[in-house]
Image (cartoon, helix red, strand yellow):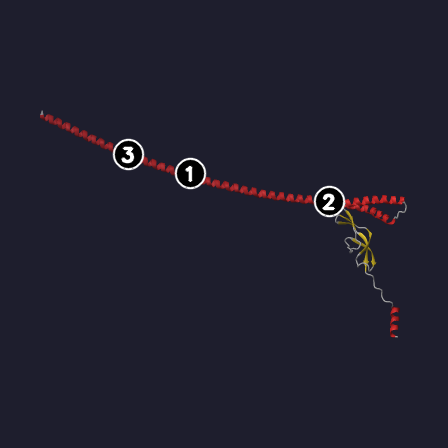
Amino acid sequence: MIDEEKQTDNTASQQSNQTNQAKQTMTSEATAQTMNVNQDWTELNTQQGDATNSSATAAENVVVEATVKSEAESQAVLSELTGQVESLKAQLEERSTQYMRIAADFDNFRKRNQKEKEDLEQQLKRNTILELLPVVDNFERARSQLKPQSDAEMSMHKSYQSVYKQLVDCLKRLGVSAMRPEGKEFDPNLHEAVMREPTHEYPEGTVIEELVRGYFLGDRVLRHALVKVASTPETAPPDTATTSSATEATES
């Protein structure tokens, strides 16, 4: 009985040992598996971290590349816009220059047209007044030659003198003025010498008499005055007979 109990105890002890060994084995295996799992998890985490880091780096690279590309594109757009602005400035300057040139040409044309118009009006006025001047000359000749004697002649004289005065006033309003050359030095730009008179009363080249009156139209000569000009008298050569008699008388 005792042996059977011993055997039973041994068997139980063996079973217990086997159980413990089995537990230890299982524990070891579980520990190994846990370590493996931990190692796998660590490796997984490491891989995930590496992947995350790689993704972050790739993302950063993408951002950098995008930024660089964006800056390059912006620089290209800016350069293009700058070129367009410069081109528009050049076109604006060219248009401004053309406008100023056209404005200057038009101003010159306007001034030239105005000058031609004024010259034409002045020429027409000049031609018209020149046609009237002989009438004025005839009035002046009549006034100097006619000597009214009776009341009827005086009345007629006053009548045509009134017409003459009206004509002269009309010419004055048009800018016509008479020359007064008597006693002045002869000027070929204003006078036309038709006669010369030797005299000691006036210096040589002085206008003695106005034969046909000259006129100005504004500040221009409308008609030259026909005048008589003083000249130096010629010295007469001594008489030969008189000189001989005087010589003989002196010798005797």
Outermost residue toward the bottom?
252
Q: Which residue is mark 3?
A: 38
Within 10 Å of disc 1 (Cα), the crowding (few <14, some 14-19, many 20+) is few
- Establish if 33 lies above or below 236: above
Q: Report, in whole angstroms, how far the alpha carbon at label 2 lies from the one at label 1.
A: 80 Å
- Residue type, numbered disc 3: Asn
Q: Which residue is mark 2?
A: 118
Sequence-wise, which precedes: disc 2 or disc 1? 1
- The quarter holding residue 35 reads top left
Sequence-wise, which precedes: disc 2 or disc 3? 3
- Residue type, numbered disc 1: Val
Left or right, 23 with respect to 113, comes to left
Q: Nearer the viewer, residue 86 or 51?
A: 86
Sequence-wise, which precedes: disc 1 or disc 3? 3
Within 10 Å of disc 3 (Cα), the crowding (few <14, some 14-19, many 20+) is some
Q: Which residue is mark 1?
A: 63
Q: Identify the element where label 3 is drawn.
A: helix
The residue at 63%/44% (across/down) is: 100
Image marks 2 and 3: residues in contact by CB distance under 8 Å: no
Mark number for residue 204? none
Within 10 Å of disc 2 (Cα), the crowding (few <14, some 14-19, many 20+) is few
- The mark closer to the camera, 2 or 1, is 2
